[in-house]
Amino acid sequence: MTTDASPPADLLPDVPPAPALARKAHASQWQLMWWQYRRHKLAMVSSLVLAFIILVAIFCEFLAPFSPNAFTPRYTYAPPQALHFFDRDADGSLVWRPHVNGYKVTIEPTALRRTFVVDESQKYPIGLFVKSDPYVMWGLFTLETKLFGPLKKGDPMYLLGADRLGRDMLSRIIYGTRISMSIGLIGVAMSLVLGIILGGISGYYGGWIDNIIQRVIEFILSLPTTPLWLGLAAAMPNNWPPLRIYLAITIILSLIGWTNLARVIRGRFLSLRTEDFVTAARLDGASEPRIIFRQMAPSFVSHIIAEVSLAIPAMILAETALSFLGLGLQPPIVSWGVLLQEAQNIRSITTAPWLFFPGIAVVIAVLSLNFVGDGLRDAADPYRQ
Amino acid sequence: MLIFILRRLLWMIPSFFAVSVVAFTIIQLPPGDFVTSYAADLATSGSPADPATLAAMRIRYGLDQPMVFQYFRWVGNALQGDLGMSFEYRTPVTDIIWNRLGMTALVAFCTLMFVWAVAFPIGVYSAVRQYSIGDYIITFLCFLGMATPNFLLALFVMYLSVEYLGYSVGGLFSPDFVNAPWDFARVLDLLKHLWIPVVVLGVAGIASLVRIMRANLLDELGKPYVETGRAKGLPELTLILRYPTRVAMNPFISTVGWILPVLVSGDVIVSSVLSLPTAGPILIQALKTQDMYLGGALIMFQCILVLIGTLLSDILLVWFDPRIRYDN
């Protein structure tokens, strides 16, 4: 008979087993952050959603079944079709055959309005990796295959409906993802540069420079942003090429959006400046850049990443609002805000409620960015507990 | 206290100055000036203006002078109540904006009251019942509210009202009352329409205020004085409302500083969707047609409105919380 020296398991206090503790003690800062982040369930789910959105933005040409500007007047305001995966064969057995149903169009004699009714008898088969009209991928090479679409070129497929000109909403939303997300990312990158320079100077040197920069930040923060954005955007000449308008809008957004980032960076610099390890490095004769990048940066980079991820949604919302009002991006550029311009009047949204879909895309993107930012902020300081 | 108010008032002077510089910059940003657009206007109507007349006009309006001079001329005129001409309406800017700005102030004020009234009890509940099902639902709705652009919400409300109520909810008055003089019936009619923009504008503010209230109150709830109160046998509701909530209220008042800009910003977009007679729709119209004197004046007064609101909230905060030092 063997004797067991340790008491039964249920009498032990609830501490993690020794290997886990040792693992924690030796884990790097980033490893600890990752463990902390993993515990935020919503943030984890949102990261997946966000990854999906970013993939859509990168591969939008390949993923969108049609060109965003391809129009078919015959299908003006065609409602969304349901995607069917199975079909009945002649003998009545179920077979795997993805398809959508066609439309039956009737014209109301009094209102002269066209109404679409889904026609069960018409079936358009759908497949993966279908041939399409040639298109240019990333502006680099020409492709003739789309991820999915109607097997026969020219068959109607409007999974999210069609707009005023019979353009496919799904393809337009997919293309809009690239513009809307990239405006958020580039705009925040620009604000970050401004924020690091001004916030860094403010927090590192202090004194009267700090005072002036802080007053400026307070002043900008106390102003209503939308009228200012609108005012600056209205100054753009109408005849600018789309790419220049795109750049101008990102610059305008970041000119006003840098203040919060600058505040956070300043706060970090201020609190770190007096830390013992910074003083030690200075006494050691380390140069200023070495102190900033080697000693201080590791302890504030994670906080800044968290703040940045919380600043992106604000940029996306701002772009959406500007474009919605017609003072931001202009067609033929397709962004979520530009798409929502179509939903501006009550007539079009009552005839075609699916014009709201780009709005849902905005909400999902902003929501997941917010949750990811929330999770990152919780994980930014793993030594807190 | 009086010295604090005086000092705070003095601070407004550089702020107003900065706002006027911003507004003037926006007016000057589009290429060309007021005479260029006047000339373009004449050219489209078929009788091109004589270059000599245009040059004379430039001299008369001081457009040949350096920018700084033009700025002081504009500010000087503005102080005397002359904000320039609107090209679009062919009337002085001042005739157009006061009514509209008043409506903006009214909508913003009502929304602020609504936001406070709703966010306070929800925030307290969410903190006291932390991690309950109700708290989770509230948290989720708050995130959703912060993620939804308010114009989308406005469109959605419009859509619902047309689809299910059978009438459109735009505007602030029924057709009969649009030009009626102010009386009790008109106020009643206004209230009937006002709640929609107030709710639409308030959602984002409520969402963020609930989060703030919850976080503040959670910080306070763990403190020893709460435990003491509980040990003394105070009823839970009295205890929470009388002590920790009062401490957590402070940031509530100071939020006016950032919520007011958000409301005025939101008003610009929401009111153009709901076609409200506030400053928003004419601002957008002016900016689209580059009617810059009107646009610049509107932007300036919207900013001033916000600055005054912030001033009032600062004074309110000091009056409300004696721990805040007046000097400094």
Image: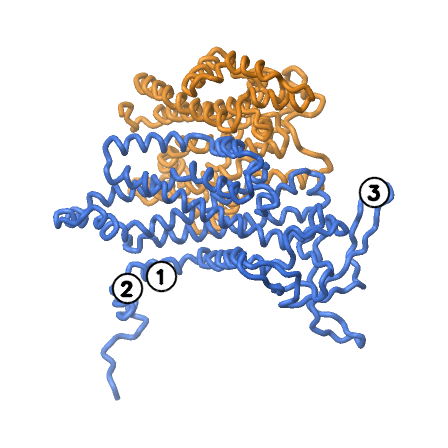
| Relative side of A15 to B35, left or right | left
The residue at the far right in this view is A109
Q: Earlier in the sequence, mark 1 or mark 3?
A: 1
Residue B231: image x %, image y %? 31, 43
* Measured Cα–Cα span from mark 3 to mark 2: 71 Å
Amino acid type at circle 1 is Trp
Q: Residue A27 carries which label?
A: 2
Chain letter of the residue carrying label 3: A
**Mark 3 and 2 residues: CB-CB less than 8 Å, in contact?**
no
Q: Earlier in the sequence, mark 1 or mark 2?
A: 2
**Mark 1 and 2 residues: CB-CB less than 8 Å, in contact?**
yes
Chain letter of the residue carrying label 1: A
Indicate the colour of chain B.
orange
Residue A237 sits above or below residue A95 on the image: above
Amino acid type at circle 3 is Leu
State the residue at coordinates (39%, 39%). Answer: A258
Residue A155: image x %, image y %? 73, 61
Indicate the colour of chain A.
blue
Crowd class of label 2 (few under 14; some 14 to 19; many from 20; radius 10 Å): few
Amino acid type at circle 2 is Ala
Name the image quarter holding the N terminus of chain A: bottom left
Crowd class of label 1 (few under 14; some 14 to 19; many from 20; radius 10 Å): some
Q: Mark 3 points at which residue?
A: A112
